[in-house]
């Protein structure tokens, strides 16, 4: 009907021979609201939405500034979105007490009583609804889906997730535990402006525990180094390894801020670099031999996928097919040479003994420095020589930056669910809730006023 329902009812007591016993059905609403020190005023149904009006039980209130007695100035209703009851969207209408100081000379003329158990300031969700929404969004659901379930706007839920998500990340002091290996990697945040300028950020990962530690709003040396320097000494002193791709910026961060940490260049990026050199030679030879880019029936174009596969994974038929295609499309055996180099670099990571692995990599660098080598392979040799010790460090504990790359995929999933971000704070909080392994039990005890 849309009109408040009066709480007067009668039930039959069978133990008292059917005599009527008065009881207060507001106990049902009290159990539904579940808050102490709160009085239920009335219940009403407005269309599909159920509204429960409440007010705080207040005895005497004194001015927090001067200590004089205060009186009620006005009692406006403020509506908050609560968790649905069954499939019914629920609203809590809180009849707030706006107080005024009786001391005319007091500077604090008026204020509104609040209760963090009901709702926090600057949030239109009740406290329990806001914490529930934070858990849902932190688990991978999109904000719009949660907002639809609560029958409210996207911005209302997003604001609550940001408030309580930040509070959870700040309160969860044990989220970052013992970290021996730190990983840096860049990831694209957003493209903005007329020319779609790319804005990059840095993912910081606990490689050993496969946990997202933080995201920095830049990939510049100064910003990442600042983040490391702001960490406690105990955190920095326990870092033994630093994993990275072939980035001079990240290498400088480790060298300056964590000089005792052993830097390890990621295996994936070394193999990727060798495959890029191989593919560059294949495309150049294709152009020189045929005068055009690769086409469907060209031997080198047909061999492109076999070339980047690990040779040990090719069966006898695939190996024979690759040899035949190279004989037909590679007159000077440049592609075949680049393929053998790529396989030699792959073999380097399979060698168990460090001294043998060092000799193997030194031999690769020496051979690639010969003037008879194609320019692409000479450039590859210079890069390996520049990062030689950091590539060799892989054999100390076979540490890779793979967990950081995997967490980047989780971050990209959050971006896909959100259809992209433009606000970095929202992006960071959503990613840390999803991939940072927060202790969700801490959220239940958090107080946001």
Image (cartoon, grey):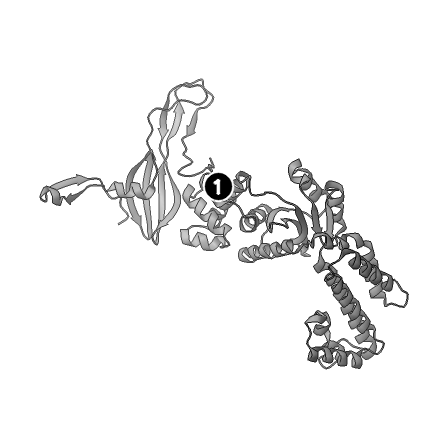
Instruction: Look at 45% across and 48% down and name the residue there.
Output: 133
**Residue 111 position in % (x across, y down):** 43, 28
Q: In the image, is 180 to the left or to the right of 383?
A: left
Instruction: Look at 48% across and 41% down and name the residue there.
Output: 442
Question: Which sits in the foreground, 340 or 350?
Answer: 350
**Residue 426 position in % (x across, y down):** 56, 47
Where disc 1 sits, the SS reads helix
Extreme left residue here?
17
Q: In the image, is 62 to the left or to the right of 294?
A: left
Question: Residue 243, relative to residue 113: is it above or below?
Answer: below
Question: Which sits in the foreground, 334 or 221?
Answer: 334
Instruction: Look at 29% across and 38% down and name the residue there.
Output: 40
In the figure, residue 344 lies in which quadrant?
A: bottom right
Q: How many marks can you see?
A: 1
Q: In the image, is 72 to the left or to the right of 235?
A: left
Question: Which sits in the foreground, 75 or 284?
Answer: 284
**Residue 385 position in % (x across, y down):** 83, 56
The answer to whether any part of residue 232 appears in the image is no
**Residue 37 position in % (x across, y down):** 33, 33
In the figure, residue 398 lies in which quadrant?
A: bottom right
Question: Residue 188, relative to residue 274: is it above or below?
Answer: above
The answer to whether any part of residue 357 appears in the image is yes
Q: Residues within 10 Å of mark 1 (few under 14, many from 20)?
A: some
The residue to which callout 1 is attached is 442
């Amino acid at each position: 009907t849309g009109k408040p329902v009066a709480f007067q009812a009668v039930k039959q007591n069978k133990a008292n021979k059917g005599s009527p016993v008065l009881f207060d059905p507001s106990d049902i609403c009290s159990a539904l609201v579940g808050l102490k020190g709160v009085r239920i005023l009335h219940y009403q149904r407005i269309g599909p939405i159920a509204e429960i009006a409440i007010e705080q039980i207040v005895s005497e209130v004194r001015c927090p500034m001067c200590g004089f007695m205060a009186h009620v100035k006005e009692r406006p209703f403020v509506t908050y979105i609560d968790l649905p009851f069954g499939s019914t969207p629920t609203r809590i209408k809180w009849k707030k007490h706006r107080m005024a100081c009786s001391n005319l000379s007091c500077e604090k003329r008026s204020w509104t009583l609040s209760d963090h158990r009901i709702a926090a300031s600057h949030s239109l969700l009740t406290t329990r609804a806001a914490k529930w929404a934070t858990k849902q969004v932190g688990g991978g659901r999109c904000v719009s889906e949660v907002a639809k379930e609560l029958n409210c706007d996207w911005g209302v839920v997003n604001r609550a997730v940001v408030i309580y998500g930040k509070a959870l990340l700040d309160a969860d002091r044990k989220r970052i535990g013992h970290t021996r290996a730190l990983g840096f990697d860049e990831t694209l945040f957003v493209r903005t402006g007329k020319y779609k300028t790319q804005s990059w950020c840095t993912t910081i990962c606990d490689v050993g525990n496969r946990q997202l530690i933080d995201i920095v709003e830049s990939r510049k040396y100064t910003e990442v180094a600042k983040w490391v320097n702001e960490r406690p000494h105990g955190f920095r002193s326990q870092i033994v390894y630093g994993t990275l791709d072939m980035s001079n910026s990240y290498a400088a961060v480790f060298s300056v801020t964590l000089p005792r940490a052993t830097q390890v260049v990621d295996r994936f990026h070394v193999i990727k670099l060798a495959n890029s050199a191989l593919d560059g030679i294949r495309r150049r030879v294709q152009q020189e031999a045929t005068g055009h880019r690769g086409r469907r029936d060209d031997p080198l174009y047909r061999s492109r996928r076999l070339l980047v596969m690990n040779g040990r994974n090719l069966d006898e038929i695939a190996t024979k097919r690759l040899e035949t295609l190279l004989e037909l499309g590679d007159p000077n055996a440049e592609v075949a040479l680049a393929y053998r180099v790529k396989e030699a670099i792959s073999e380097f990571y399979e060698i168990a003994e460090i001294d043998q692995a060092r000799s193997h990599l030194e031999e690769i660098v020496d051979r690639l420095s010969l003037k008879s080598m194609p320019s692409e392979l000479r450039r590859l040799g210079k890069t390996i020589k520049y990062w030689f010790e950091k590539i060799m460090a892989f054999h100390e504990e076979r540490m890779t930056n793979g967990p950081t790359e995997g967490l980047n995929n989780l971050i990209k999933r959050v971006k896909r669910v959100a259809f992209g971000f433009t606000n970095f704070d929202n992006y960071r909080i959503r990613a840390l809730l999803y991939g940072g392994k927060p202790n969700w039990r801490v959220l239940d005890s958090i107080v946001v006023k």
